[in-house]
Image: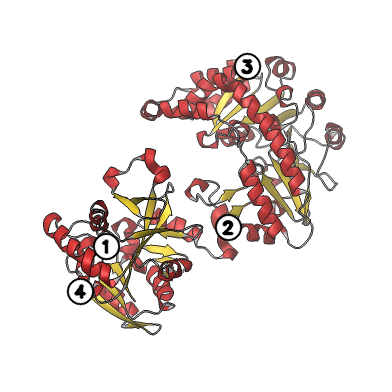
Amino acid sequence: MQAIILAAGMGKRLGELTKGNTKCMVNVNGISLIDRTLTQLSKLSLSRIIIVIGYKGENLKNYVGDEYKGVKIEYINNPVYDKTNNIYSLSLAKKELQEDDTLLIESDLIFDDALFSMIVDNSYPNLALVAKYETWMDGTMVRIDADCNIVNFVPKDAFRYEDVDVYYKTVNIYKFSREFSTNEYVPFLDAYSRVMGNNEYYEQVLRVLTLLNSSTLKALPIQDEKWYEIDDVQDLDIASTVFSCSETKYEEYHKRYGGFWRFPKLLDYCYLVNPFFPSKRMKDELRANFDTLLAEYPSGMYVNSLLAGKYFGIKQEFVVVGNGAAELIKVVMEEHTRDKVGVIYPTFDEYPNRLHPEQIVAYIPQNTNFTYAADDLMDFYADKSISLLLLINPDNPSGNFISKQDVLRLASWCEGMNIRLLVDESFVDFTTGYADNSLLHNDILLQYPTMMVMKSISKSYGVPGLRLGVFASSDVDLIARIKKEVSIWNINSFAEFYLQIYGKYEKDYAKACQKFIAEREMFFRELTRISYLHVIPSQANYFLCEVIDKYTSAELTQKLIEHDVIISNCGLKSNMRGRNLIRLAIRSREDNSKLVDILKSL
């Protein structure tokens, strides 16, 4: 068996990275693509490796040489690489294709070592490696039947998003027998090139063979094996993360602060959203209005505060809408740049990160589960000089919850102490009896004018991609100031439309919250059976857990990322007293069962 690597292209979309070298010379985590591929090939029993070169071909030739780890290297030059596509590069190697069984590989790939042994060891002589369609994939798709016959090659212009459930992407690694190349592929390659020219793709020849029902080419779907095709700088960035070493992999993911939809195999236990809302019908309504919402400007703050008031049943002049709670947190905390602020630790770091360290008066519960009550806060801050007290309720990451009655008692105490109280109730809808636990009511806001309420709509409503949050207070001068601080179009049309239609789906939301509470109880029981975890009871959509045996929190985080699970290592947070703490989001039954199985296996 031999291998043919197509490496003639210019890789223009990689910009500066391919200015002086061909695409396969680009490094991923310090190793060039060509070195990685040749090392993988050198472990096979190959008679030779043929590289079709073109753009900066001499550089590649000088770099690789005539042999690589004992395997002979030959070169074929494509002098018109800038005027042709890969069909011409492969046609230049048609004589060699007919001399031996061949592994055909494109040079812009990075993939697990297992892929070559999968295709070589398979008994079918003619195979295309394929992967179930995922959103990042682009290029040639195929449809296959139950016997792994390729029913059709689907070119880009025939791609239909409504058919993605049945599509597989070609990995661009093929195995051709000498007989297949001689009797099927090369004759059709010659004929196709004569008719269609050389600015085409070699897969189009395979498509013709499939349409004629004469091809012996089979598909071999990969499973959990990793691969990526690198066409541009974002592909390179994603590939660098997917193929990072275990010591740096967590940091590579964590530094992104989201965008994990680019990694469909990653199980995200960091970010905190409701897994049971929005309902399918609500998402269908959003989809049905996609074209209009994409093409139209959103309304300004006047309309959006009206919609938010309707959403929560409070006055328009009491509420300001933000591009997520994060935008509002920034603006609100800037109102207190010179004040002393009471902060309860552990906490959501976005708040203290907006303060100077000398502003913070920290309360740290001195017990195993980080629990505290309203009386604890009043006792602690009674002799402290603070202008603002921050209460996240339920707390993040501990899940500690103070009842509404006690929060209002705390608000009265703050009024008497001339302290403003900021309550972040982003997770309150996950609490038992959630329907009566919110502070977003006109009468409550009016009764406690120095109390402010922050709420992220991302969390309990399951729409973090819309970036929605609200801040409410009966202090209309404060609300007016904050409205002036945010931009006039600070939320997009999709977020505005979501606010507009939510009222039709309130019953669905109530069912989702009930379903969530049941799932939390089940997940808690399962996690408590993991011998090396102490699970802290929570009224939010996450559990703070102490790793009490076998691992540190950092080690467990690393173990899980190797299983494509990302969690939050809370041992890194402020004022954790060196304890090995992690936070696990609560997801769907299927995902939670998968995580529990992985934790058991560790």
Point out residue 434 in the picture as x, y percentages from the top left corner.
72, 27
Q: Residues within 10 Å of mark 3 (few under 14, many from 20)?
A: few
Given the image, on which type of amino acid does mark 4 rest?
Lys
Label 4, label 1: how far apart the Cα atoms are: 24 Å
Q: Earlier in the sequence, mark 1 or mark 3?
A: 1
Q: Earlier in the sequence, mark 4 or mark 1?
A: 1
Locate residue 90 relative to residue 173 in the image: left or right.
left
Q: Which residue is mark 1?
A: 10
Given the image, on which type of amino acid does mark 2 rest?
Glu
Q: Earlier in the sequence, mark 1 or mark 2?
A: 1
Q: Residues within 10 Å of mark 4 (few under 14, many from 20)?
A: few
Q: Secondary structure at mark 3?
A: loop
**Is the C-beta separation of discs 3 and 2 under 8 Å?**
no
Q: Which residue is mark 2?
A: 251
- Looking at the image, can residue 461 be seen? yes
Q: Earlier in the sequence, mark 2 or mark 4?
A: 4
Q: Which residue is mark 3?
A: 313
Hey, which residue is sitting farthest bottom in the picture? 70
